[in-house]
Image (cartoon, helix red, strand yellow):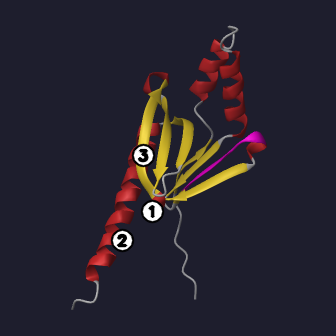
Amino acid sequence: MTTTMQEDTFYEGGPAKGDLIFNLLLGLTLIGIPFAVGAIVRALWLRFQITSRRISVSGGWMGKDRSQVVYSQIREVRCVPRGFGAWGDMVLVLSDGARLEMRSVPNFRAAETYILERIEAKRASSTAVDTKGFAA
């Protein structure tokens, strides 16, 4: 008998469109060309999926690199607003010290709140199991 838990999707999609627009305008200058190329690559191949069970990021060349993190692995969430707060960059610090960077996350404040709520729920459920022990 297998039990499956429903996985609710909070966000699924690519980076913020404002990031692409801003960097394309910046690309009209000689100095801004590398930033514009980076924004185009992110827009084409970077995808985020934030669900009730995990965070998945697929990116890299042609979108072939994929990273998945469950909430119990996340130790800390760091955010930096970009584009006057319309989008932002997030870094998920994992329990083993590794970091997962998420660039140009649209509506990143709501995503940060959602992720922090899931982390707290996982910690609360794991401490509730630990406190029961063998005492009766």
Magenta run includes residue 60: yes
Q: Determine the residue positioned at 67% across, 34% down.
A: 42
| Rendered location of residue 35, percent (x, y) | 65, 21
What's the residue type where badge 2 is placed? Ser
Q: Earlier in the sequence, mark 3 or mark 1?
A: 1
The amino acid at mark 1 is Ser
For this orientation, the residue located farthest to the left is 136
SS class, disc 1: helix
Q: Is residue 54 left or right of residue 65?
A: left
On the rendered image, what quadrant is the C terminus found in? bottom left
Query: Could you give the CA–CA distance between mark 1 and mark 2, rounded to whole angstroms?
Result: 9 Å
- Callout 3 environment at 10 Å: few (<14), some (14 to 19), or many (20+)? some
Verify whether residue 67 appears in magenta.
no
Estimate the spatial distance between the alpha carbons at disc 3 and disc 1, rounded to whole Å: 13 Å
Question: Which stretch is magenta?
Answer: 55-61
Q: Quadrant for residue 30, please give it.
A: top right
| Residue linked to disc 1 | 72
Q: Looking at the figure, which quarter contains the N terminus?
A: bottom right
Residue furthest to the bottom: 136
Say the numbered circle drawn on residue 126: 2
* Mark nearer the N terminus (2 vs 3): 3
- The residue positioned 72% from the left and 24% from the top of the image is 37
Residue 112 coordinates in the image, percent (x, y): 42, 44
Residue identifier under label 3 = 77
Mark 1 or mark 2, which has the lower sequence index?
A: 1
Q: Amino acid at mark 3?
A: Val
Classify residue 44 as left or right of residue 73.
right
Looking at the picture, how far across and down is residue 103, in whole percent?
A: 56, 36
Do the CB atoms of the residues marked 1 and 2 lie less than 8 Å apart?
Answer: yes
